[in-house]
């Protein structure tokens, strides 16, 4: 009798101990948004700025600064006990030059094999260090990975994070990745969220227009400006249709931005010239880019102060914008991967 009581007590103790393990907590009770830390995200910007400082002030594909950035990303993910993979690729740019790059892919396995994918390009142009464009996106995804690991709770869906190379040479890294993905692998991706250039001061925040609601007003404006129906059709008819699931993702992004009183604009064009493009018709896709268009005296259009220039450094990154983007990305993790 004594023995049975001891055994029961032992069993109860075991159950209690195992309940203490975070893994048994309901996943709804955690918040990656609250766990993520803006100071720790900013530290990645400082580290990437230092990489540029040591490597001729740029981190373009294949350059010493580009390679050092890839090594930094891999190191940071390994510190989280994750297993990032470098995936080399070769692709031709618009000038038909062969570009050799390497994407970095890492997964945080979930309870299901369904994938919620996030991506940011890590290469810069040759003209500058690319801290707004796009160390900001990289820093946010690294901090997101840390926040997920910190909670010690397995996500419901698998989180896959991509750090793309050679975006600045024509979205080459993400396009090569999709080109090499099998059909069943493509079908596992239930959403793709892209983060590009999210440290712009006083930005016009562009959100991928997943429901094409920006097309009718664009047509109306063209009509008012006297453009013929035929010309309008030529200009807008060629825009590919977004995946039908993108409308739902757009809603989540916009609700979040509204809740933070951030104004935004539906956008189709920019989404087709960054790493959202290869995913556009393949899976539900969303993404943000923050621009602040300036026309320089010589007629050059800058999409942000120091866009693709030597001065795209950490001093010109806006903390407020950066923190909003960190909030948005981590909110998307809560909404899409933990449910
Ligand atoms: N990474 C930026 C670029 O490709 O230059 C994304 C961007 C595209 C920004 C278009 C503004 C306009
Ligand atoms: Zn960019």
Image: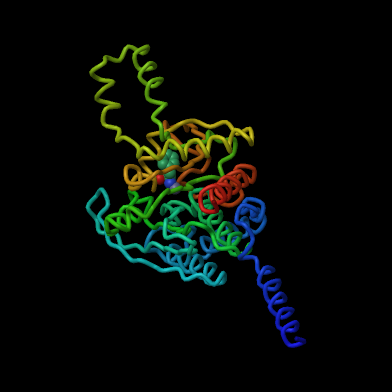
Nearest the viewer among 279 and 297 is 279
Q: Residue at x 53, y 33 (%)?
A: 204
Q: Name the side, left or right, on which 166 lies relative to 26.
A: left
Instruction: Give the image quarter of residue 147.
Output: bottom right
Nearest the viewer among 321 and 149 is 149
Q: How is the image coloured?
A: rainbow
Q: Name the side, left or right, on which 69 lies relative to 242.
A: right
Residue 154 locus on image (x, y percent): 55, 63
Nearest the viewer among 130 and 163 is 163
- The residue furthest front is 1
Q: Residue at x 57, y 50 (%)?
A: 334
Residue 58 locus on image (x, y percent): 46, 57
Residue 327 locus on image (x, y percent): 61, 47
Q: Is residue 226 above or below residue 115?
A: above
Position of the N terminus, as image quadrant, is bottom right
Residue 267 locus on image (x, y percent): 43, 33
Q: Residue at x 39, y 45 (%)?
A: 276
Q: Quadrant of ligand 1?
A: top left
Q: Residue at x 51, y 56 (%)?
A: 138
Q: Name the side, left or right, on which 15 lies relative to 270.
A: right
């Amino acid at each position: 009798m004594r023995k049975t009581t001891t055994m029961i007590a032992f069993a109860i103790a075991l159950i209690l101990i195992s309940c203490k393990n975070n893994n048994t907590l309901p996943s709804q009770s955690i918040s990656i948004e609250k766990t993520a830390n803006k100071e720790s995200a900013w530290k990645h910007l400082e580290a990437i700025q230092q990489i540029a400082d040591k490597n001729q002030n740029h981190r373009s594909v294949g350059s010493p600064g580009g390679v050092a950035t890839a090594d930094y990303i891999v190191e940071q993910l390994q510190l989280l006990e994750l297993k990032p993979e470098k995936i080399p690729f070769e692709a031709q740019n618009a000038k038909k030059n062969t570009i050799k790059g390497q994407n970095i892919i890492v997964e945080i396995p979930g309870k299901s094999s369904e994938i919620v994918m996030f991506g940011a390009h890590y290469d810069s142009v040759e003209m500058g260090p690319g801290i707004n464009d796009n160390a900001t996106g990289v820093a946010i995804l690294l901090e997101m990975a840390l926040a997920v690991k910190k909670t010690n709770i397995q996500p419901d869906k698998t989180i896959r994070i991509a750090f793309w190379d050679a975006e600045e040479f024509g979205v080459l890294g993400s396009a090569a990745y999709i080109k090499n993905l099998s059909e069943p692998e493509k079908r596992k991706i239930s959403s793709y969220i892209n983060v590009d250039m999210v440290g712009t001061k006083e930005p016009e925040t562009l959100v991928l227009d997943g429901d094409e609601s920006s097309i009718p007003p664009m047509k109306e404006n063209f009509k008012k400006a006297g453009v013929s129906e035929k010309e309008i059709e030529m200009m807008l008819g060629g825009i590919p249709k977004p995946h039908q699931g993108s409308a739902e993702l757009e809603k989540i992004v916009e609700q979040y931005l509204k809740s933070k009183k951030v104004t935004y604009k539906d956008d189709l064009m920019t989404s087709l010239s960054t790493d959202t493009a290869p995913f556009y018709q393949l899976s539900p896709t969303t993404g943000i880019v923050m621009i602040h268009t300036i026309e320089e005296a010589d007629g050059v259009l800058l999409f942000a102060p120091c866009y693709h220039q030597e001065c795209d450094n950490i001093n010109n990154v806006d903390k407020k914008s950066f923190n909003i983007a960190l909030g948005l990305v981590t909110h998307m993790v809560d909404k899409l991967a933990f449910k």
